[in-house]
């Protein structure tokens, strides 16, 4: 029974569809336009939705294209920044070299009565027992042992040993260094020896008749066979009182700042 009913229903639906098709095919054009308009009202929202999605997709493509362009510009700016930093470092090196050359020139003009070779400090051998610097010139430049080394402020020390292209300089504040010195006011001679204290020397063998004044300057006496006469050493910093006047001594603050010393001149006059 069910199969017969299903068959009847199917036949009925088929007949209805055929009648509809015949009816539609016999409609006039203006009536068909009415159906077309109704159909369009259904389809247009769908088309609008598809167009919207298309535009969104196109926008995303443009967004990604813009991102790629920004990344490229950022990389170009990064490379330019790297080049600018390198140029700045080169400029700083040039300025440093110019400053060094200017200091050399000032030193040469200041000590124009001497024949000198400019140099700069490349190493510092500082311990509890010595104060020795290494400079960047040696025997190939005419440097020899015991040559006097000076700076803009005054006496530095003397050449201790040399290689072809370097030299060791024993500074004033090294305990092994002894300098015969002359007091500016009295012209009396004293002996200055390094103490290893920061920029300090100890002066001994002071005459009992010598009048000492803090701040009085000392210069090389020219005696002793190493240092020429008249090079500034430093000034009296402190006068030490002693029970025995024959043991009189005082502290000299060296004119040269050995902690920050960079450029020097080696006197080659023999």
Image: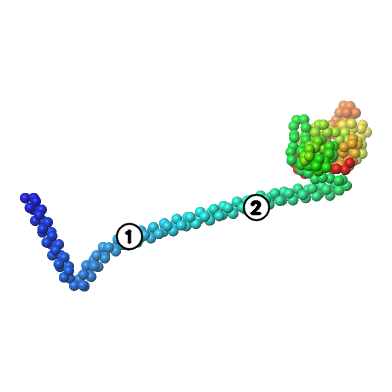
89 versus 190 height, above or below: below
Task: Tell me, for residue 68, which label it has, or none.
Answer: none
Q: CA distance from mark 2 to mark 1?
A: 57 Å
Q: Is residue 11 left or right of residue 151?
A: left
For label 1, the crowd category at 10 Å Cα-Cα, with few meaning under 14, some 14 to 19 and many 20 or more, is few
Residue for point 80% across, 45% down? 118
Q: Residue at 33% across / 60% down in the picture?
A: 50
**Residue lying farthest right?**
209
Residue 196: quarter of image: top right
Mark whose residue sits in front, 2 or 1: 2
Tell me the quarter of the picture where residue 192 sits: top right
Indicate left or right for 269 with 32 as reference: right
Toward the viewer: 237 or 78?
A: 78
Q: N-terminal of the two: label 2 or label 1?
A: 1
The reply, left or right, for residue 45 in relation to residue 227 is: left
Image quarter for residue 164? top right
> Which quarter of the image is occupied by the C terminus?
top right
Among all residues in the image, which is located at the extreme left?
A: 1
Q: Is residue 17 visible?
A: yes
Q: Dot 1 corresponds to which residue? A: 49
Q: Residue 10 location in percent, x, y?
A: 12, 56
Q: How many marks?
A: 2
Residue beneath label 2, please?
Answer: 87
The correct choice, above or below, for 187 with respect to 42 in the image is: above
Q: Is residue 215 visible?
A: no
Please, what secondary structure does the residue beneath circle 1 have? helix
Question: Percent x, y for residue 244?
Answer: 89, 27
Disc 2 crowd, CA 10 A, few/some/many (<14, 14-19, 20+): few
Q: Nearer the viewer, residue 49 or 164?
A: 164
Mark 2: secondary structure: helix
**Residue 190, x across and y down, in percent:** 89, 34
């Amino acid at each position: 029974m069910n199969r017969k009913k299903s068959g009847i229903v199917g036949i009925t639906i088929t007949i209805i569809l055929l009648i509809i098709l015949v009816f539609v095919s016999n409609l006039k054009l203006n009536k068909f336009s009415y159906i077309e308009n109704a159909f369009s009202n259904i389809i247009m929202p769908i088309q609008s939705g598809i167009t919207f999605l298309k535009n969104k997709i196109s926008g995303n493509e443009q967004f990604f294209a813009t991102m790629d362009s920004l990344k490229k510009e950022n990389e170009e700016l990064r490379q330019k920044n790297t080049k600018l930093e390198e140029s700045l470092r080169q400029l700083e090196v040039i300025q440093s070299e110019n400053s060094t050359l200017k200091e050399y020139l000032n030193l040469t003009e200041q000590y124009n009565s001497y024949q000198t070779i400019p140099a700069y400090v490349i190493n510092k051998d500082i311990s509890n027992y010595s104060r020795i610097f290494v400079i960047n010139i040696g025997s190939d430049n005419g440097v020899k042992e015991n040559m006097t080394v000076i700076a803009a402020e005054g006496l530095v020390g003397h050449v201790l040993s040399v290689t072809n292209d370097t030299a060791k300089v024993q500074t004033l504040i090294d305990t092994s260094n002894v300098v015969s010195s002359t007091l500016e006011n009295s012209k009396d001679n004293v002996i200055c020896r390094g103490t290893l204290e920061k920029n300090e020397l100890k002066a001994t063998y002071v005459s009992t008749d010598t009048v000492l004044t803090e701040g009085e300057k000392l210069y090389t006496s020219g005696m002793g066979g190493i240092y020429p006469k008249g090079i500034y050493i430093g000034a009296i910093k402190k006068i030490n009182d002693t029970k025995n006047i024959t043991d009189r001594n005082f502290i000299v603050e060296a004119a040269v700042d050995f902690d920050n010393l960079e450029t020097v001149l080696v006197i080659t006059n023999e």
